[in-house]
Image (tube, rainbow, N blue to C red):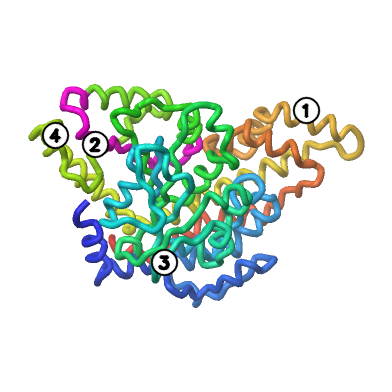
Amino acid sequence: MEGLAKKLKKHSGSKGESAIVACHPAESPIPASWFNSKSGKKIPLKSVTSIVDGLKKSYIEKLRPLEKTYQFQDFVSPLLTSSDFDAKPMVMLLGQYSTGKTTFIKHLLKTSYPGAHIGPEPTTDRFVVITSGPDERCIPGNTIAVQADMPYSGLSSFGTAFLSKFECSQMPHPLLEHVTFVDTPGVLSGEKQRTQRSYDFTGVTSWFAAKCDLILLLFDPHKLDISDEFKRVIGSLRGHDDKIRIVLNKADQVDAQQLMRVYGALLWSLGKVLNTPEVMRVYIGSFNDKPIRETAAGPLGMKLFQKEQDDLLSDLNDIPKKACDRRINEFVKRARAAKVHAHIVSHLKKEMPALMGKAKAQQKLLDSLDEQFAKVQKELHLPPGDFPSVEEYRELLSSYNFDKFEKLRPKMVQGVDDMLAYDIPELLKKFRNPYD
């Protein structure tokens, strides 16, 4: 991975500096306190000095009032804070134990980070966020979750059981000034081990997946089986397919013929889990500090590993460049999800009887939720791809009283439509990505 920090350093001068600042301003003109106001506050146009400021303005004025009215935060995702917009790009590593996740990060940083443990047994037993800081230290999860300048307040919803298995590792490093890494516990195989986790592992992974810019799924030639838990984890990445990259690590442990078979077997296994017609991009290599075993790889393997490493390096190097685009993409995705949620909730409210038989009517609506989704979609001409999972929503809705939901407020929904149709394109016209 030689040269990644060097390339990022090069981008932080002249042209590149404005690109990174455009996404992560040190002092945003829009104060964090405006996110705590009870209603959609009007923000003066002079406060908008970058794309991220424009997104904050649109969120506070138009999208957040809709989310709060229809309880979007209870169903899909917590309300956004100022730190969610200002956060650096994130890269998450997922895989079964001992596939080289921690070693991969260590290899990129060219040094170990505080709290890193490496071994053949399941060593990383917690989610670790590796980020830039003035000194080397580990910050416990409960502390990180309440820090206003960190984008992890949403993790509080997973409770103390999870926060005790979460920590932030800070250290001064040039690469970490541009990118944050998320190291995860090895995914377990076997139902017994899965049920022994004291928190919702799949839920936490899904939360991080929504925030991340890149998700690396690591495999090694001797661990190609996809366990039930790993299958659930990959399933929780639904909707983030464009962020997923597959890494076949420790590939120098097998010879060229075995590697060919391993590669085929890996694609076959993934094809059964990912359910996409497209072939996933797989990077083959040995991402650690040891020299590649030429006896196993051969001269052809050495050349292949080098090319694959360069491709992965290029992908990682593009992350800060694409940070603004990714931020806009996630914002638009969230706005569309919030709009659909508002229509679903208000439709269920409308279908409830005025006086008698409310409990029976609610149960009937829950049982025919897929039909209600189809009705909303047909009436309002909404794309089916914007609708959430019926089963997940049924489970969440069962604990609510439909009668207490808000009626549809067309003006509020129209505000979000105008934001998507006019405000965001205008913002992109006004503040172009300096890399273009």
Which residue is at a point 11% across and 39% down the rendered structure image? Answer: 303
Residue 255 painted magenta: yes
* Distance from Cα at disc 1 to Cα at disc 2: 52 Å
Disc 3 versus disc 4: distance between alpha carbons?
40 Å
CA gap between label 1 and label 3 equals 48 Å
Task: Specify the segment rendered in magenta.
Answer: 236-260
Precedes in sequence: disc 3 or disc 2: 3
Identify which amino acid the numbered label 3 is placed on.
Answer: His
Residue 14 x %, y %: 24, 72
State the residue position of label 2: 284
x and y percent of residue 92 in the render?
Answer: 41, 47
Q: State which tag comes first along the sequence, 1 or 2.
A: 2
Q: Residues within 10 Å of mark 4 (few under 14, many from 20)?
A: many
Residue of label 1? 364
Task: Please say if the residues under marks 1 and 3 sit with CB atoms less than 8 Å apart.
Answer: no
Marking on residue 24: 3
Mark positioned earlier in the residue sequence (3 or 4) = 3
Q: Quadrant of the C terminus?
A: bottom left
Observer-side mark, 3 or 2, equals: 2
Quarter of the rendering containing residue 384? top right
